[in-house]
Amino acid sequence: MKFDNIIIVTDLDGTFLDEHEGLVERNIRAIEYFKQNGGRFTIATGRAAEHALGAVPCAPWLVNLPAVTCNGACLYDFRTGESPVLHTISFDEVKEIVAFVRSEFSSVGVRASSPEYCFVSTPEDMENPFLKSDLSRYADTKNLIAPMEKWKDTPIFKVVLRVDSELLPKLMSALRDRFGDRFSFTQSWATIIDIQPSGVNKGITLEKYVRETLGEEVKIYACGDYVNDLEMLECADVAVCPSNAHEQVKAVCDLCFGTNSDGLIADLVEYLDKRQ
């Protein structure tokens, strides 16, 4: 079939979803055509799996390969509900990160993600305006709001820092100075820093899984728009971005099509169709 051995993987916000975080019907039709002709499609996002499912409710039948969630900390199969890959941070490490942030950057809100809960946070953190907004936005998800000692038996695969955009560069620098290479620090939005185990990102998680399960002959087309997509784009065989992408992303991409709202994935499928 014409798209055998081709994988398309896409970020969600600013890439696959439109400017209102909605689905683009043109993309959905293109993906179905792509899959019917042998292609494999999946998503790679900073969101937890449940949050991604809220944005893409059709994910269980739309994707036909496990999805990268939490910026690579978790690989999640929407078809089975299983996580074939899960990278966790120890409870002691989580405590150390939180203690440092609260001591040096008291205005920063802290939450975490786990396989069971979308948001793991303390009651005092819920006073933070960023986290109040997050919890309101995802009020229908399963969350754990409890003192930190109650987190002990909950595996954590991502710590999220919600910070004013003007403070973010200073916080990022301080984190790297304090923790060195012990963790991966990813800016996934203008006001968000994700902290994962060292060496974990969208690109490494995706490429390792694909090569181990599908082999070296598979060609990966990765689509992204923001700096937390850079590792994935650099690991891909072909890097693709929308015209609204961050300038750093455009600099590493091989292909650039229309905006996310126009239907980036549809543009890519049409491009591939003409070349097969």
Image: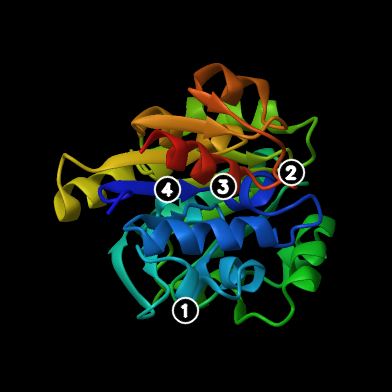
| Between discs 2 and 4, the one toward the N terminus | 4
Q: Nearer the viewer, residue 120 or 210?
A: 210
Work out which residue is located at the far top of the displayed protein and give it: 251
Name the residue that disc number 3 marks: 265
Residue 91 appears in the picture as rendered: no
Name the residue that disc number 2 marks: 163
Q: Which is closer to the viewer, label 3 or label 2?
A: 3
Image position of 203 (left or right of 60): left
| Between discs 4 and 3, the one toward the N terminus | 4
- Look at 81% across and 66% down and name the residue there: 132
**Cα distance between the residues tagged 4 and 1:** 28 Å
Q: Nearer the viewer, residue 240 or 145?
A: 240
Per the image, label 2 sits on a secondary structure element best described as: loop
Q: Are marks 4 and 3 in contact (CB under 8 Å)?
A: yes
| Between discs 2 and 1, the one toward the N terminus | 1
Q: Is residue 153 above or below residue 239?
A: below
Label for residue 8?
Answer: 4
Q: Is residue 75 above or below residue 161?
A: below
- Look at 80% across and 72% down and name the residue there: 136
Considering the image in quadrants, where does the C terminus appear?
top left
